[in-house]
């Protein structure tokens, strides 16, 4: 089972409202791509936007803890602005919302509902907020299971008052973990001036087993600690916008790991890594052809004609 822990929110682009949030989107993407069992853990509001979030989870066959889905606080909002190149910037309304309202006991209780879980995903706003990131750490420490951890920095600089302090936390959090993904935007915010090779060395020194670097039109690379690098080109397809493309990529990677039994083998060869990168890149490309984050099914991924 895959567990995705952290924030949910709604993305508002003009008149359009869609479910969103990095861990939430990643759960949707993993389930739709064909992962065996996926759970989302996070508080969801009882308001109309919360109803949309719940409905989308149910439609996508993503499990959740019902006790976390009746929060009286409102749903967080991310107002998106699209640039001419289809990239997106966000204005977040998070204060006093359900997005980061979960506490340690909420997460521990939710984790107890999934005793057979192998994979734990977290990232983005859930780890950016100083209070909430400690909640996540405390919950995982209390649970104590050696999850395969997949962390996506998905940095939102406008939400981080102390970038140096965040970087220190982030590197402690990912130390000796399994998979870390950074985009070129994340790297520019966290490690200005470091090129891809230097980033790979840094994560290797931290004990990260697999470092995935996504570069938009430049494709994606997977650096295995002590085992070389596999790179794939970007998939060329029509672009509506880039909302949720990274989250969709994350979910597709988790789906592949689940399907090949990485939790048991704890090993990947170059051929497996290449297939995972190609599948995840195709998933992200399909998502980009649609407005907002709307991760594809396995059939839609395989049927993409660039």
Image (cartoon, rainbow, N blue to C red):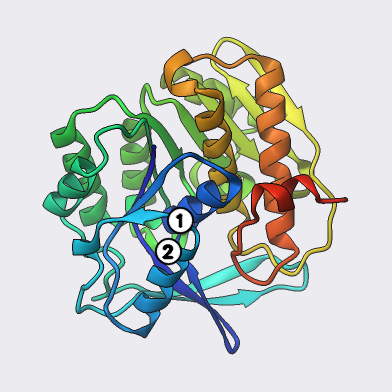
Q: Which residue is mark 2?
A: 58
Q: For the point 67% across and 72% down, which residue is it?
A: 291
Graded by Cα atoms within 10 Å as few (under 14), some (14 to 19) or many (20 or more), the crowding at tag 1 reads some
In this orientation, which residue lies closer to the viewer: 48 or 139? 48
Is 144 on the left-hand or right-hand side of 225? left
Identify whether 77 is placed above or below 233: below
Q: For the point 57% across and 25% down, which residue is it?
A: 200
Q: Could you say where residue 271 lies in the image, as x and y percent from the top left?
A: 71, 18
In this orientation, which residue lies closer to the viewer: 91 or 286? 286
Which mark, residue 61?
A: 1
Which mark, residue 298?
A: none
Q: Could you say where residue 227 lies in the image, as x and y percent from the top left?
A: 61, 11
- Asked whether residue 187 is in view, the answer is no
Q: For the point 26% across and 49% down, which residue is it?
A: 133
Gap between marks 1 and 2 measured at Cα: 5 Å
Q: Which element is circle 1 on?
A: loop
Q: Residue furthest bottom?
A: 15
Q: Could you say where residue 225 lies in the image, as x and y percent from the top left?
A: 54, 15
Q: For the point 50% across and 23% down, which residue is it?
A: 261
Mark 1 and mark 2 residues within 8 Å of each other at the beta carbon: yes
Is 88 on the left-hand or right-hand side of 75? right
Identify whether 264 is placed above or below 65: above
Q: Quadrant of residue 65?
A: bottom left
Graded by Cα atoms within 10 Å as few (under 14), some (14 to 19) or many (20 or more), the crowding at tag 2 reads few
Q: Quadrant of the N terminus?
A: top left
Identify whether 196 is placed above or below 184: above
């Amino acid at each position: 089972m895959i567990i995705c822990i952290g924030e949910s929110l709604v993305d508002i682009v003009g008149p359009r409202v869609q479910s969103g949030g990095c861990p939430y989107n990643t759960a949707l993407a993993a389930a739709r791509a064909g992962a065996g069992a996926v759970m989302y853990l996070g508080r969801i509001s009882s308001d109309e936007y919360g109803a949309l979030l719940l409905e989308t989870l149910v439609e996508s066959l993503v499990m959740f803890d019902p006790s976390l889905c009746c929060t009286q606080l409102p749903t967080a909002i991310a107002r998106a602005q699209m640039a001419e190149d289809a990239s997106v910037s966000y204005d977040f309304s998070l204060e006093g919302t359900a997005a980061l309202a979960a506490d340690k006991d909420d997460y521990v209780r939710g984790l107890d509902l999934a005793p057979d879980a192998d994979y734990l995903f977290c990232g983005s706003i859930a780890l950016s907020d100083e209070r909430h990131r400690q909640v996540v750490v405390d919950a995982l420490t209390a649970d104590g299971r050696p999850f395969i951890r997949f962390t996506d920095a998905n940095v939102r600089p406008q939400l981080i008052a102390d970038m140096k302090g965040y970087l220190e936390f982030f590197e402690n959090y990912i130390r000796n973990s399994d998979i870390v993904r950074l985009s070129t935007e994340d790297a520019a915010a966290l490690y200005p001036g470091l090129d891809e090779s230097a980033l790979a060395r840094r994560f290797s020194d931290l004990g990260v087993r697999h470092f995935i670097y996504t570069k938009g039109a430049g494709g994606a690379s997977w650096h295995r600690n002590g085992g070389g690098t596999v790179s794939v080109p970007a998939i060329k397809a029509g672009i509506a916008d880039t909302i949720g493309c990274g989250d969709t990529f994350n979910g597709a990677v988790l789906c592949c790991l689940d399907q090949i039994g990485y939790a048991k083998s704890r090993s990947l060869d170059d051929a497996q890594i290449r297939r995972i990168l190609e599948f995840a890149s195709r998933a992200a490309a399909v998502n980009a052809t649609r407005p907002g984050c709307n991760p594809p099914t396995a059939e839609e991924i395989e049927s993409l004609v660039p």
